[in-house]
Image: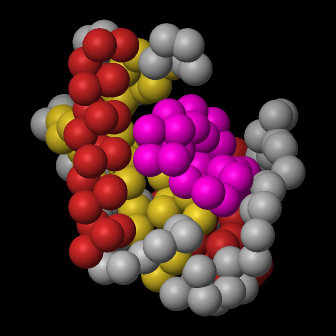
Amino acid sequence: MSSDDEIQRCLRQMADDLRQRLEAARMGDALMVGIHTGGVWVARQLHAQLGFEQPLGELDISFYRDDFSRIGMNPQVRPSRLPVAVDDRHIVLVDDVLHTGRTIRAAMNELFDYGRPASITLAVLAERSGRELPIQADVVGRHFDLGEHEHIKLSGPEPLQLSIVEAP
């Protein structure tokens, strides 16, 4: 579907858009946080392109999901890692795919358990229709129009590849 070259072009454009947004809003020293797993892969590349000073943060939102009681524990739960305090800090939250908005809601709930950020800017590699919550990305690599039973899957981390798969 999307080759590594296409994804790299999207990431360069996302980095440019983020740089402009952060500079215009004077959000220096922002903390970039990726959501496990694909969001961390995307965040690593954006973090390097933007030359952020703070180390990259990582969130595993497994315990914050609203479907936790239905799907059970993820067998690969990882600890979240935020290298600095989030209080009064501008956060760039990164995920691979924005669909219903529930993953982002869970990530924001976890971030607020760590403190009160000054702001959160959302960057996603891929966005598709089907939002169930009023959540919107500030920076998007690529928009997809998909059928109800189609989903976007990011494979990686090297190389990154987006594919469209049929829901089981």
Please tell me which residue lies in front, 82 or 95.
Answer: 82
| Residue 25 position (above or below residue 61) | below
Q: Which residue is drawn at 59% across and 80% down?
A: 89
Residue 70 falls left or right of residue 3: right
Q: What stretch is highlighted in magenta?
A: 33-62
Residue 139 falls left or right of residue 153: left
Whether 101 is among the magenta residues is: no
| Residue 148 position (above or below residue 117) | above
Residue 137 falls left or right of residue 90: left
Whether 46 is among the magenta residues is: yes
Q: Residue at x 55, y 70 (%)?
A: 29
In the rendered picture of this protein, how many numbered marks are placed on residues? 0
Task: Confirm whether residue 39 shows in the render.
Answer: no
Where, by quadrant of the figure, is residue 57 drawn?
Answer: bottom right
From the image, which quarter does the N terminus lie in?
top left
| Residue 34 position (above or below residue 133) | above
Q: Where is residue 158 in the image (x, y as percent from the top left)?
A: 55, 13
Please tell me which residue lies in front, 113 or 28.
Answer: 28
Residue 74 falls left or right of residue 144: right
From the image, which quarter does the C terminus lie in?
top left
| Residue 97 position (above or below residue 105) | above
Q: Where is residue 37 in the image (x, y as percent from the top left)?
A: 63, 36
Colour mapping: secondary structure
Q: Residue at x 47, y 81 (%)?
A: 119
Where, by quadrant of the figure, is residue 71 drawn?
Answer: top right
Q: Position of residue 28 (x, y in %)?
A: 47, 73
